[in-house]
Image (tube, helix red, strand yellow):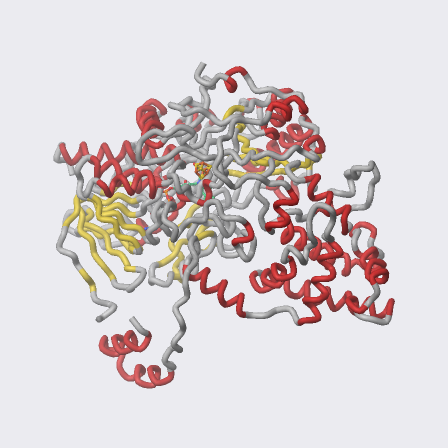
Amino acid sequence: MKRRDSLKALSLTGFGLAVGPTEAAVPAPPDVKPLKIPGGRQKFEAERDAKLMAEKFFTPHELQTVTVLSDIIIPADERSGSASQAGVPAFIEFMMKDQPRNQTPMRGGIRWLDNTCTKRYGKQFVQCTKAQQIDMVEQIAYPALAKPDMTQGASFFTLMRNLTASGFFTSQIGIKDLGYVGNTPNQWNGVPDDVLKQYGLAYEERELNPGK
Amino acid sequence: MDPFQIQKPPTQFDVAIVGSGAGGGMAAYTLAKAGAKVVLLEAGGYYDPADPKYITQLKWPWESPRRGAGTTRAFGDFDAAWGGWDIEGEPYTTAKGTEFHWFRSRMLGGRTNHWGRISLRFGPDDFRRKSMTGVGQDWPIGYDDLKPFYDRVDRLIGVFGSVENFPNEPDGIFLPAPKPRLHELMIRKGARSIGIPVIPSRLSMLTKPINDERGSCFYCAQCGRGCQAYADFSSSSVLVKPAMKTGNVTLINGAMVREVITDPATGLCTGVSYVDTQTLQEVTIKAKSVVLAASAGETARLLLNSKSSRFPTGLANSSGVVGKYINDSTGASRSAFVPALMDRKRYNEDGVGGMHVFTPWWLDNKKLDFPRGYHIEYWGGMGMPAYGFGWGVEALNGMIAARDGSKKPGGGYGAGLKDDYRRFYGAYVGMAGRGEPVPLESNYCEIDPNVVDKYGIPVLRFNYKWSDYEVKQAKHMQDTFEEIIHSMGGIALGEKPGADNSYGLEAPGKIIHEVGTSRMGNDPKTSALNKFQQAHDVKNLFVVDAAAFPSQGDKNVTWTILASSMRTSEYLIDQVKKKNI
Ligand SMILES: Cc1cc2nc3c(=O)[nH]c(=O)nc-3n(C[C@H](O)[C@H](O)[C@H](O)COP(=O)(O)OP(=O)(O)OC[C@H]3O[C@@H](n4cnc5c(N)ncnc54)[C@H](O)[C@@H]3O)c2cc1C
Ligand code: SF4
């Protein structure tokens, strides 16, 4: 039932005078294209996801900062690509909108970083040389060692590290790097023999010969 | 169409069942198989884990934009629960100074679609704790009354486990248990070395097929997402669907029952009225008997909301106990890092969707300063990464030397950090105690005088505080966890919870085993239901969820809901045959 029809129905049930002006004040709903609900999603979730995807949180400068930082945290190496190659910045952008409590620590943290870099090197973080960027990161990468004027930066960097790791190791590249080989139909027959041997462990008789 | 029109379908059903979770599914199955014409009213939508519309099983974290984070689903984006701690438009409240968390699922099968499938029988002592300790309440029945039903539930639904012959952990009719994973073997070895038993877990997943309708487990570790092969137990797939095949069940989804209707002259129930959650129409259903299975909280809410001049304090509540004695399992946990598990060889150890081993209660409370026991659940291993992976590494990697033996401060960045994540993967374990509380009259839920939900139905207000018994039990859990962790060479993570935070005792409700809100007993003055879970005051009204349970044992409750729902349903059939109702 459309909103207008239900209001009409209300008037019929005798709510009387108030209905006229209220009805006039309610604009007809805009014609929205029906959303395709992906498998395994509830309607409200699909709508929410679509809305969040259409929004933007980071400015281009912020996104660039997040990209540089995430690649400092997880660089490419002989085994796999870097955070940005695994799509981490886009994941962080989405998480800002999905869990808005992260927005202020993230946005403010980037500001803190730029202010501190401007004081130290005369430039915002992304404009600094690689050596300056690393010099800055060294000040905030070890929370227990951070100097009193660096502790807010250390909190921000911890947030960045955690989001970067989560984003990287849940990507296709990251899961391959990690060597997770499950999520597929299989038979579980216990820990491989060589691994049991390595750890000096063994199954019990009844586990090896069930039903006996 | 007038949305406020009251519709009255002419049909009269033999039985109206409210709720399709563990209790309601079993009642529908048992009654329909016996030929009763059943209407099954479920507030939530239709759900089938094998329909692509609903499937989340075998999806990868990157298929979720939040990588599986629990933003809209408490247990993660892929979890099968529709609902959670908070449901839009369906609030509940707590009295000042008390705390309660209420997990509700609004879907066919209720919370059995994504439960942990830990399927334990209560033991003989769990029915008589008051006699044994002087506190709490005995059941009006004993283990022998339920044993035949447990046996039939085991055969009908399927549960794996091992025969152990422990006095208070009755063995069932078990399918083969999966072998322990590596960290579980380490836990077992460590715990046993300090006298703590570790035995195969007892979960309702089919390690072998039991019939043609359900497949067998293919070890994806994702039962919480719902199984396409129907190899795990959920009420929707395993009970409701076969019940519907009898042709005797009318399932109505989106039916939020508002109250049970009674005849003022006879005092018997005549049916229920519900709100259609889509159209918001009010509908009345007529039935010769009413069976409540809306979950312990909702069942109490329904009874208390079903007030009439004949039943001014709510239905089945002449004793005044409805809502009282609500109790949830206790819970506390600790996790650890196991250096020996660093740099592990990779292989698929997903296993079933849950632990392969657990610790049943092993001590004698007579020798302890708290009156009830707990069991321990374990986790760990090389699971599928999800949102939160690697979180908090800064608290750990400063303690662990790199491959070249060098140490660096906690935190960091770059190639060394990236390598730390790889090395630490699969080297964590965790454990959680799940214990029995003492049910207290001072813990209760009631109707909030000021608040209604979006359907206009008055909501529940909870009043719940742990007592000293539970806090002392949690302290014992924490001591035990550290002993187990040390016995296996692990490093316990975080501060050990202490007196200042009640030893990490989770807030009431958090373990999602609430029971006791319309307890059964022999005395109509102190109980709402008789020993067949039939209302003392209204003989054609039955409760088949955990609202009926006087206590909860140190076991998870669902297997007992299933067994007692089967028992009550058969009693109902028998009473109809004898023309007593
Ligand atoms: C994450 C999780 C893990 C768990 N793990 C375990 C475990 O390992 N072992 C164990 O034993 N237990 C476990 N539990 C608890 C278990 O799920 C419950 O004990 C069990 O589902 C209770 O069954 P029930 O029939 O009482 O209620 P539910 O399963 O909650 O079903 C009640 C149904 O009634 C419907 N309903 C409610 N109100 C109304 C109304 N007014 N009108 C119409 N319909 C209504 C609901 O929509 C719901 O579908 C777990 C629960 C959760 C959430
Ligand atoms: S672990 Fe087994 S029973 Fe559970 S969802 Fe996977 S295949 Fe199904």
Residue closest to the eye, B290 or B109: B109
> Quick check: can you spot residue B413?
yes
Image-quadrant location for residue B281: bottom left
Quadrant of the frame with the N terminus of chain B:
bottom left
Residue that sits furthest to the front in the current view: A78
Image-quadrant location for residue A127: bottom right
Image-quadrant location for residue B225: top left
Residue found at x 28% / y 64%: B279
> Quick check: can you spot residue B446?
no
The answer to whether B89 is drawn above or below residue A5 in the figure is above
The answer to whether B88 is drawn above or below residue B414 in the figure is below
Q: Is residue A147 left or right of residue B55?
A: right
Q: Position of residue A22 (x, y in %)?
A: 35, 82
Q: Is residue B176 left or right of residue B468?
A: left
Question: In this figure, what is the number of numbered marks?
Answer: 0
Residue closest to the eye, B550 or B284: B284
Q: Position of residue B264 (x, y in %)?
A: 17, 52
Q: Write down which quadrant ligand 1 falls in.
A: top left
Q: Position of residue B2 (x, y in %)?
A: 22, 70
Q: Is residue A95 left or right of residue B2?
A: right
Quadrant of the frame with the C terminus of chain B:
top left
Residue closest to the eye, B545 or B134: B545
Residue closest to the eye, A147 or A35: A35
Residue found at x 61% / y 59%: A91
The answer to whether A191 is drawn above or below residue B223 in the figure is above
Q: Position of residue B514 (x, y in %)?
A: 43, 42
Q: Is residue A150 left or right of residue B53?
A: right
Residue found at x 64% / y 24%: A194
